[in-house]
Amino acid sequence: MSKVALYHCDTVDQIPQRLQAIVESLGAERVSALFQGKKVLLKPNVCIDHPPEKGATTHPAVLDAVIRLAADLDAGTIIVGDGAAVGVKGRIFERTGIQAVCEKHGVELRDFNRAQGRRVQLDDALALKEATIAETYFEVDTVVNLPVFKTNMLFWISGALKNMKGLLVGMEKHKPHYLGVPQCVADLNRMVRQDLVIMDGIVGMMGDGPAAGEPANARLLIGGFDPVAVDEVAARLMGFNPARIPMLRLAEKVGVGSSRCEVLGDPISSFKLRLEKPTVAKNRLMGVLFDLGGRFFFRKVGEASRMVIDAEKCTLCGRCQTMCPFGAITIADKMVSVDMHKCEFCLCCTEVCKTEAIHLEGLLVRKESFLRG
Ligand code: SF4
Ligand code: SF4
């Protein structure tokens, strides 16, 4: 049976003390072994450039406390990394407050949407047979997942399991939306492990998360080693029956974790959360229809999208070619071309092009709000 530690946390000042309580509940020795002398990746949720008070992203105060904990436990190297959702660009780490925390502690911050990736295959996958995972994942000894306590418009919950989508490089994050999010999240969590989960419910999100909901002000922290068990407890706190959540059940079925858990700390019954429900909970039929129709829609979107060069604006400077992590861009005969078989839609080229000569064309640009997750 998996242990899950749950604590009220009414103010940001209480976070370090509650974090310590989580460590002790889970077993200080086991937690310590994950950090001591290890290269540690802290994986917050930085899916969108909302400020912390919106509750869509990991609260900087939680990241701050976890970095301090890692340092206290003699972590060898600490890296913070995530990649925002498809279509979200700009100063995301700055706006979410994540960058300031990293700078304060002198911790390296990596944007996985600009990262090198490694191809991973899963022959017996439910849906995600291969994926490009950020290379950082393979460099580290320990992965500490810092998801946010959020309800999700279509998939009930955005928690520990789904937060691992941030390890998918660039447009790879788009894939689950047309292959099936619950199936792909289960597959992804077989490709990548998480050693410790600290779920941030300081603010959190209710209603139509993961980005368009309202602040939940849940004021809680959840910790555990098993992402299925942590999400199970989060779902119960949200007022859902976890047995009805496909993502959790599929993840359990393929062996990612177990829903059988012992809750330590504050009892679930002591939390009187009144959360606005997501669409899927308000209208189950609509959720099912969107899931079926959505897969078709996203598949078509994926097929229709491509990188396009405006030859009149292009100065042939070569920056896009240098930047492309997947070697998809070539310049020959005074022309830039993109091999769409290699392109992973990371959009790094669009970021470096000074003349805005290269851009993504297709429905993705206009429908990007559907892709946040
Ligand atoms: S970065 Fe822009 S201007 Fe430079 S070669 Fe690429 S498309 Fe052309
Ligand atoms: S062509 Fe552009 S969007 Fe495609 S992989 Fe290269 S840098 Fe990324």
Image: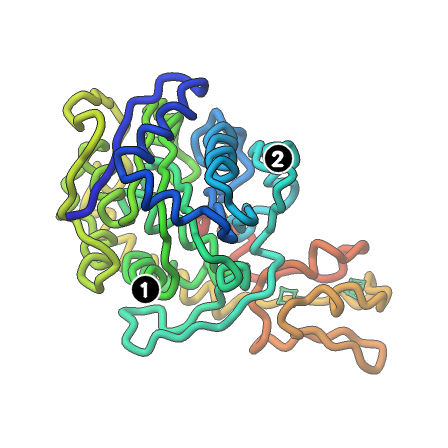
- In the image, residue 95 above or below residue 110: above
The reply, left or right, for residue 156 in relation to residue 263 is: right
Q: Give the mark nearer the N terminus: 2 vs 1.
A: 2
- Tell me: residue 2, above or below residue 250: above
Give the residue at x 52% y 70%: 118
Name the residue: 36% across, 37% down: 199
Query: Under tag 2, what secondary structure?
Result: helix
Coordinates of residue 16 in the picture (x, y in percent): 43, 25
Tag 1: Cα neighbours inside 10 Å, few (<14), some, or many (≥20)?
A: some
Above or below: residue 369 compared with residue 11: below
Q: Of 122 and 22, which appears nearest the observer?
A: 22
| Residue 190 tag number | 1
Q: Relative to 61, is 4 on the left or the right?
A: left
In the image, is the residue at mark 2 within 8 Å of ligand 2 by its beta carbon? no
Tell me if residue 171 can be seen.
no
| Residue 105's disc number | 2
Q: Residue 113: in sight, yes or no?
A: yes
Q: In this orientation, which residue lies closer to the viewer: 119 or 74?
A: 74
Q: Position of residue 114 (x, y in %)?
A: 62, 57
Percent position (x, y) of residue 66?
Answer: 46, 35
